[in-house]
Image (cartoon, helix red, strand yellow):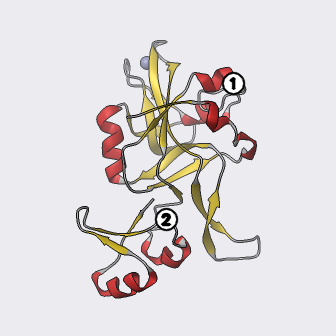
Amino acid sequence: MPLKINVPYAEKDLAKEKGAFWDKENKTWFIPDHKDINLFSKWIDTEKVSLIAKVPFWLGVTQKTCWKCNNITEVIAFASNNFLIYDYSDDDSDIKEWFFQNYFSFFSSPNYIDKEVLDIVCSRYPFFKLGFSKTVNSKYFANHCKCCGALQGDFFMHEEPGGEFSPIDMDGYKAITLIEVPYKFDLMIDASHSWASNEKEIFKYIRKSKW
Ligand SMILES: [Zn+2]
């Protein structure tokens, strides 16, 4: 599915030549799925975007007990089984490229999320917003308790074995619902992903639902 790119007016002919298209309705240049994204790197803001999840991408939704008030609250995390990461091609290289990853991962501690996607997600999950985490001493888009407003840190939900988004068995995965985000372009985000390539099969077994 298409990826939005940011082409200055002066470079529109070059973008077209390389295979980009203009989307009239959404007033943006985009590249179709079959094109090599690395040909278009200069029009992707890699200062902000470190990860691109192809359409369709999901929100994992589940519940947890708030560490502060002990009430049950909903928590979400972006997820994909078909995404690209921007990384060095090998240890000696100082050039970064986009690489495809074909395993299932939740994304944690996002610092940047495409504004349009963020608006869609926050209209339904207003407790998902920028917050300061004392655990990691920085700001990121985090879940907050719907009862007391306390930040529910991604570290424990994603990094601790048995956390809401790092289950250690199928029962843990069954507690999560994947909701397809209704957006026609690929997700541009800056976030951490898991390296658990053995999770390829898991995607099949998680419950999925429409928005
Ligand atoms: Zn609470």
Q: Is residue 107 above or below residue 100?
A: above
Q: What residue lies at 62% left-to-right and 37% top-to-bottom?
A: 203
Mark 1, other Cα within 10 Å: few <14 / some 14–19 / many ≥20: few
Mark 1 in CB contact with mark 2 (< 8 angstroms): no
Mark 2, other Cα within 10 Å: few <14 / some 14–19 / many ≥20: few
Left/right placement of residue 165 relative to residue 89 reads: left
Tell which of 130 and 137 is nearer to you: 130
Q: What residue lies at 64% left-to-right and 23% top-to-bottom?
A: 172
Q: Secondary structure at mark 1?
A: helix
Quadrant of res 123? top left
Q: Secondary structure at mark 2?
A: loop
Tell which of 136 and 118 is nearer to you: 118
| Total numbered labels | 2
Q: Which marked residue is nearer to the observer: mark 1 or mark 2?
A: 2
Residue 169 percent coordinates (x, y): 72, 25
Image quadrant of ligand 1 equals top left
The residue to which callout 2 is attached is 33
Q: Is residue 138 above or below residue 144?
A: below
Left/right placement of residue 101 relative to residue 64 reads: right
| Marked residue nearer the N-terminal end (1 or 2) | 2
Residue 43 percent coordinates (x, y): 42, 74
Quadrant of res 143? top left
As shown in the figure, which amino acid type bears the numbered disc 2?
Asp
Q: What residue lies at 38% left-to-right and 19% top-to-bottom?
A: 148
Q: Is mark 1 within 8 Å of ligand 1?
A: no
Quarter holding the N terminus is bottom left
Q: What residue lies at 66% left-to-right and 48% top-to-bottom?
A: 103
Identify the mark at residue 170; answer none if there is no mark: 1
Residue 190 percent coordinates (x, y): 50, 54
Quadrant of res 145? top left
As shown in the figure, which amino acid type bears the numbered disc 1?
Met
